[in-house]
Image (spheres, rainbow, N blue to C red):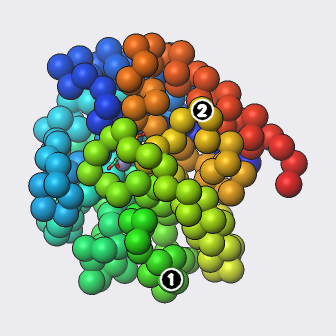
């Protein structure tokens, strides 16, 4: 299994995003995770398409954009035009998830579906064959620096089983409270896209933190199962 590391710039210094992204990339970041929050679906407010567009100009790796917003359909095109290669939406806000997933694909981006900690895996069952990836939230979305919710580990296994039954090899992304100490557990459970914000950007050396997280994730992925 291959594992990708996606540092979340939510925990970076927004006045120095270019340097933060470059450091993460030097450390081996495979993607840059961009958290978009609207102050409605989640309590926090972050950034929109203009900032994604600026980041796209300097990032060497693809942008993984996580939409924590109500009515995401209104903004899909703007985020893909701004440079999102991967665009994920929350199942909790979408009565017509099938339409939204296929709209993202039609725009040329990979379509991800996100489950909050309290959302059952069954919410995905009708869409298991359609998604390009599934993002399992391992904290309640809205802020960086929260504690990993242990139940998320078995939830990743349940999502893997659901995707496998649908014949879909789509990867599982995990987001929230991941660091180099617990990453092996979630990789062993089947997560292969690892988001980390505070673990990468709060220690003063994002290049090294990314490298260490990636080494721990790759070591876990190479254990035969
Ligand atoms: C939380 C965001 C996360 C956040 C993760 O709502 O979706 O991407 O940046 O931060 P850490 O890794 O600090 O939990
Ligand atoms: Zn996120």
Q: To which quarter of the image does residue 4 belong?
A: top right
The structure residue drawn at horizontal position 74% and vertical position 40%, both measured from the top left corner, is 220
Tell whether 60 sits left or right of 49: right
Residue 23 x/y as whole percent: 42, 16
117 and 96: which one is in front?
117
Q: Is residue 88 left or right of residue 157?
A: left
Query: Residue at horizontal 83%, vertical 43%?
Result: 223
Q: Quadrant of residue 145?
A: top left
- Reading the image, the residue beneath label 2 is 180
Residue 62 vertical position relative to residue 1 in the rendered view, above or below: above
Q: Is residue 111 visible?
A: no
Instruction: Tell me the crowding category of disc 2: few under 14, some 14 to 19, or many 20 or more residues within 10 angstroms, Cα based.
Output: some
The reply, left or right, for residue 54 in relation to residue 222 is: left
Task: Please tell me which residue lies in front, 208 or 54.
Answer: 208
Quick one: SS at disc 1? helix
Disc 2 Cβ-to-ligand 1 distance below 8 Å:
no
* Residue 180 seen in render: yes
Q: Which residue is mark 1?
A: 122
Residue that appears at 51% across and 76% down: 121
- Percent across and percent down for residue 91 are 35, 73
Indicate the position of residue 35 as horizontal and vertical percent values: 29, 45
């Amino acid at each position: 299994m291959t594992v990708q590391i996606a540092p979340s710039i939510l925990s970076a210094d927004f006045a120095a995003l270019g340097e933060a992204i470059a450091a993460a990339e030097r450390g081996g970041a495979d993607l840059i995770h961009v958290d978009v929050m609207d102050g409605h679906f989640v309590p926090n407010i972050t950034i929109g398409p203009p900032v994604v567009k600026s980041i796209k100009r300097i990032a060497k790796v693809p942008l993984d954009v996580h939409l924590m917003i109500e009515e995401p359909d209104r903004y899909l095109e703007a985020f893909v035009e701004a440079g999102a290669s991967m665009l994920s939406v929350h199942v909790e806000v979408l009565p017509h998830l099938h339409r939204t997933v296929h709209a993202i694909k039609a725009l040329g981006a990979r379509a991800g579906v996100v489950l909050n900690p309290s959302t059952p895996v069954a919410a995905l069952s009708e869409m298991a064959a359609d998604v390009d990836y599934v993002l399992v939230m391992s904290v309640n979305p809205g802020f960086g620096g929260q504690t990993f919710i242990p139940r998320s580990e078995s939830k990743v296994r349940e999502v893997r089983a659901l995707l496998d039954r649908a014949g879909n090899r789509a990867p599982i992304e995990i987001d929230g409270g991941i660091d180099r100490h617990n990453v092996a557990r979630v990789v062993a459970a089947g997560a292969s896209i690892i988001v980390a914000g505070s673990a990468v950007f709060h220690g003063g050396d994002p290049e090294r933190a990314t490298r260490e997280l990636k080494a721990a994730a790759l070591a876990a992925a190479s254990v035969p199962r």
